[in-house]
Amino acid sequence: MSTIRLAAIAITAALGAAAVGLLPTMSAEQNAPAVVPADLLYPGESRHLANVRQLTFAGENAEAYFSFDGQQLSFQSNRAHACDQIYTMKTDGSDVRMISTGLGRTTCAHFMPDGQSIVYASTHLGGPECPPVPGREQGYVWPIYDTYDIFRVNVDGTGLTRLTDTPGYDAEATVAKDGRIVFTSVRDGDMEIYSMNGDGSDVRRLTNRPGPDGGPFFSADGSKIVWRGRPLQPGQELDDYFSLLKQGIWRPTSLELFVMDRDGSNVRQVTNTGVGANWAPFFTPDGTQIIYGSNAKNPRGNNFDIFLVNVDGTGLEQITFFDGFDGFPMFSPDGTQLVFGSNRNQANDGDTNVFVADWKN
Ligand SMILES: [Ca+2]
Ligand SMILES: [Ca+2]
Ligand SMILES: [Ca+2]
């Protein structure tokens, strides 16, 4: 397997949803040997993790996020469709149910606080097929399909309601405990973060700086937002970014983490690695630290790992040590469990599955 291919698989996994399925699956004879469940914990990981359980075993699975009562997970998978659909399951991996339409591509699902409905993004209004995958003429790029809008649906699949209707990409919706939604949109000509009520009303723009901003999550108390971005100065990189954005693609290779108050004020930079993608951040339940995935140690490689850092950028600690992709970490609301995506115990090379571990402080 070439280094380029490894990196492409890693980035595909790291970017999750929208990118999953863009690459062909490796043939069966190239399968990595499976490890027994006792080996799901790798040397160095026992400082914070214990009792690692694999919840999914079919297809690509990513972005698993806890419900507010900690009893269920929403996630996306291509197990039964050509591109990702949204599912729920219990935290032991049982009772898997598809709640999206089965049409188009979907991404980034999150439970509402009462556990009775879920928000997610889908391209199905743009057509029933999987949207086209961009070519490689621009190098490695990630599609931001202009047919993505954010929807809300009851957990039984009924009551599908469209929450965004502006032209262009609207996705990456997550929810505060009071029901306020934060999401990413290109409605004003750049990738920015917005918030809105649970019914799509009262939309407010929270970021306003050239360059990609996305992947926002509220802190448990709803007072802060953490996200990943790359503020760009006027010049070649910014010109290139806007040129790609007009084509519905971007190049997510170098990203840092930031926090702000829920109204968009008081922006502070958390990481400053300068290289690699710091990705998919989430606050610890007490709001003092951020857990996230990163390939900063090996910016061109596939070995993303999960890290923990204080909100002020100090106290960086590596959590996972599997030699392959680990990312999309999220704590259960009570802080006792960590859910994450990983290539560990892959049946096919590059498979991403959902894992839950006990968290040790
Ligand atoms: Ca839209
Ligand atoms: Ca921006
Ligand atoms: Ca890793």
Image (cartoon, rainbow, N blue to C red):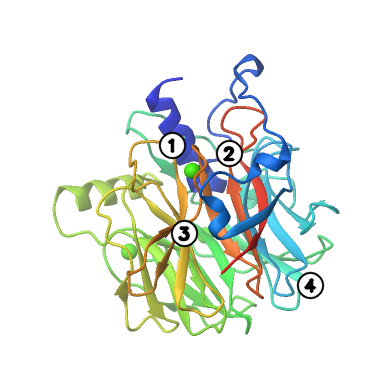
Disc 2 from disc 4: Cα separation: 31 Å
**The CB of the residue at mark 2 lies under 8 Å from ligand 3:** yes
Disc 3 from disc 4: Cα separation: 28 Å
What is the x, y in percent for residue 283? Answer: 50, 71
Of the numbered discs 3 and 4, the one sitting upstream in the chain is: 4
- Secondary structure, mark 3, is strand
The amino acid marked with disc number 4 is Gln
Of the numbered discs 1 and 4, the one sitting upstream in the chain is: 4
Residue tagged by mark 3? 292
Local packing at callout 2 (Cα closer than 10 Å; few below 14, some 14-19, many 20+) is many
Residue tagged by mark 4? 116
Looking at the image, in which quadrant does ligand 2 appear? bottom left
Does residue 121 appear anywhere in the picture?
no
Tell me which residue sits at (54%, 44%) in the image.
43
- Quadrant in the picture for residue 157: bottom right
Number of marks in picture: 4
The reply to whether the C-beta atoms of the residues labelled 1 and 2 are less than 8 Å apart is: yes
Along the line of sight, the residue nearer the viewer: 255 or 210: 255
Local packing at callout 4 (Cα closer than 10 Å; few below 14, some 14-19, many 20+) is few
